[in-house]
Image: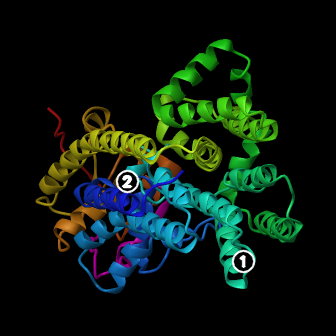
Amino acid sequence: MQISGDTYTKWTRIFFAVMTVFAVVFANERFQADGAHYLLHVVQSESFRIEHQRFILIFSQALPWLGVQLGLPLSSIIVLNSINPVVWWLLLFLYATYVLRDREAGIGIILTHVLGVLHIQFTPMYEIWYGTPLIILLYAHLRNNRTSKPSDLAIFFVILITALFAHPLLPIPVALVFLYHSAETKKINWRIILPVIAVAIGWYTTKKLMITEYESGKMSLVNAEWNNSPSQLLRISYYGKLAVFFLTWYLIPVVLFVWALLFLWLRKMKLQFALISSFFLGHILLINYTHENYTSLTPYFERMYLPLIPIVLIPFLFTVCRELEMRKSFVLIVLMFIIGWRIGRFASVGSEYKENTALSMRLIDSTQKLHGSKFVLADDDLRNCYSYADWSFPMETLLRSAATDGYKCITIVTTPDLTENGNREKLQESEFLFRRWDIIKDRELNPDYFSLFPGKYTYLPRTCK
């Protein structure tokens, strides 16, 4: 796939410029759920928040952490938090393009930024999303024979270890990288494979010794007696529902997958065909064997299905495009269409998030005029106009109120937050709910950014009309 340097540089610059504008415009929409949890921890503790040995979280928190170290206002830190993933993908793109000199890998990096993610764009810190483009870099190292020099080898294994620890599902596409490359070259490079196996054993041993309750619970879904998900695979109607899900949320990856399979079949690349089909369909089977695919859980399933993106891109970019010797104009038209369409979808979904933000800010503005700092959302409001308020709402309201008026911070919880684990009875006037599972003292807040007045939680009046 030959693309002139000037054309390649021009369009990739446009892409990163557009994504930077998107990040600034939607900065106030890009911290909710886990995003609010990690951002608040970074500002509160002035350090990185690492959980489940997923140290890739350091990279997802780098810019907001830097903003805290520089003493920037919270409003600026929120913008840095939104720009952070753009910088991460840009650095990986530059490494693929100018260090590995692999433009196909550079395009693959860009595509991992837009494919398979929609709601994740508004919680831009997920470890699995940050780890996905590393799969492309691993393959680029192998296909360009960049595993001989000590410096290349060191970077290669840093990328490998980071990807393995990023998320328990990423070892699946990592395994495909080595199997598919061996199929392409028709040989096994034991000089690389043996140390890779040693690293994999070390990763597995470390995870077994240090596994957290959260990850243990996720892994137990495979054989949990109470998990009824396997039974859904016996219903023919379920596959129709699954097809609708993929054609709605994963249309482009499905098209690229079918295209790649047809090409491999017609070219009689049987081993590559078997690898791609088994990994793609096997991953879908694994997720649906352990989870029921409810529509309401679409943001969650975006994360679960993300390993499918490199599984599709590796054969399409590095085999199909190479073998067909696609014209640069055709490649650029397809690339522009895919990226443009996805950015349009981000903006469309972002408008819904902006409506929620505006609603929250109106609530915060009226609440800041009341006496006290700790409030409970009216149950009728939660059922109606604030139905989007989830477990992260107390953190979101604390961040938003501190960003607008650091001298009048508030936190708003919901009744489910208070009833969780008997919080209503446990809470003292000098304490507040960081989130429904964490009670901390008012005085423990970082005084540079937050302040809450001691007192009991009081119910807000109904605001929805």
Horizontal arrangement in the rendering, residue 100 relative to residue 19 (left or right): right
Q: Distance between the residues labelled 2 and 1?
A: 38 Å
Between 330 and 275, the residue placed more toward the observer is 330
Q: Position of residue 280 (x, y in %)?
A: 68, 38
Q: What element carries label 2?
A: loop
Task: Say if 153 sits above or below 338 in the image.
Answer: below
Label drawn at residue 129? none
Residue beneath label 2, please?
Answer: 32
What's under tag 2, amino acid-wise?
Answer: Gln
Residue at 85 percent of width and 70 percent of height = 198
> Local crowd at mark 2 within 10 Å, few (<14), some, or many (≥20)?
many
What residue is drawn where x is 49% and y is 35%? 252
Give the quarter of the image for residue 67: bottom left
Please identify, in this view, whether the residue under mark 2 or under mark 1 is nearer the observer.
Answer: 1
Rendered location of residue 458, percent (x, y):
26, 53
Total numbered labels placed on residues in the image: 2
Residue type at mark 1? Leu
| Residue 31 magenta | no
Judging from the image, what secondary structure is the residue with disc 1 in?
A: helix
Q: Can residue 85 be seen in this view?
A: yes
172 to the left or right of 111: right
At which x and y percent is residue 376?
29, 50
Please tell me which residue lies in front, 278 or 31: 278
Identify the magenta region.
435-455
Q: Who's the residue at 69% across and 58% down the image?
A: 213
Report the residue marked by disc 1.
Answer: 153
